[in-house]
Image (spheres, helix red, strand yellow):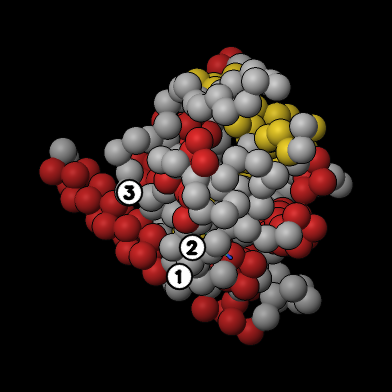
Amino acid sequence: MDNATKTIEKKVETSSASKLINEKSTKYPESFINRIVCGNAVDVMKQIPDESVKLVVTSPPYNLKNSTGNGMKDGRGGKWANAALQKGYSHHEDAMPHDEYVKWQRNCLAEMVRVIPEDGAVFYNHKWRVQAGLLQNRHDIVDGFPVRQIIIWKRKGGINFNRGYFLPTYEVIYLIAKPKFKLVPKANAVGDIWEFAQDMKNDHPAPFPIGLIDQIISSTDAQIVLDPFMGSGTTAVSAIRHGRNYIGIDISPEYCEMAQKRIDQEKAQSRLSI
Ligand SMILES: C[S@@+](CC[C@H](N)C(=O)[O-])C[C@H]1O[C@@H](n2cnc3c(N)ncnc32)[C@H](O)[C@@H]1O
């Protein structure tokens, strides 16, 4: 048993008084550490003990099909005819009423913040967009959570379908941190604008570029990294490359299988290169 797993076990023992931990959490960590759990993010996170995971890195569904004007809504694609997400995800339509979506994401964030300790952090990726002619930032989702910084992820190119505003080329990563969170020495020098091209070789409709996650994980000393919207497994693969443990959750059995295959390939690759 490695040190990280021992630490978690200790937390399980010491946190048994917490009202947030239900009986199922006694299975933790065996059923979660270095596993992809196929299920609903909030339900699965509820089984993770308080303050037991130092780093959460995630990108939720953006609710892109609930949109005022780009054709994503009705599936035609409009000028986004080739957009991978025009059909939503395999097991999530990505078209909730806005208020419902915000409530859901706030519930997800509450769970993520609950599971990190006083020196832990959540890197929560999202996208701002123009809706009915006005900027829709994601303040309604993160309001009240301890947002410490907004990192700009500058993507390559994009599609400009509206002359009313400039071509959007960035997404944001909210660094939501508890008071004692610190980066490893010198990691702060990289600044707060990060440029990474999208991953075009992945069958998932909205994958992280792995470089982005490498940058986050290598900037921390977290031994366990949770991604409650794991998709194709990018966070897990990056965690393995950095010698960390992961916990991945996704609602789609297809994407869970995709993630597991990538993880197996990564492990096989690293065995070959020893
Ligand atoms: C933006 S994608 C994440 C992609 C991932 N970062 C990657 O690199 O492949 C969002 C993911 O959330 C998943 N999802 C949607 N609803 C979910 C839910 N209720 N619980 C868990 N996962 C969910 C989708 O299946 C999708 O894979």
Q: CA distance from mark 3 to mark 2?
A: 15 Å
Q: Quadrant of residue 124?
A: top right
Q: Residue at x 60, y 48 (%)?
A: 64
Q: Quadrant of the C terminus?
A: top left
Asked if residue 143 is positioned above or below residue 38 in the image, the reply reads above
Q: Residue at x 51, y 53 (%)?
A: 75
Residue under numbered circle 2: 250
Circle 3/circle 1 CB separation < 8 Å: no
Decide which of 66, 219 is in the foreground and name it: 66
Residue under numbered circle 1: 38
Circle 2/circle 1 CB separation < 8 Å: yes
Q: Residue at x 38, y 50 (%)?
A: 204
Q: Amino acid at mark 3?
A: Asp
Q: Is mark 2 within 8 Å of ligand 1?
A: yes
- Dot 3, how many residues are within 10 Å of its Cα: few (below 14), some (14-19), or many (20+)? few
Which numbered disc, 3 or 2, marks the residue that appears first in the sequence? 3
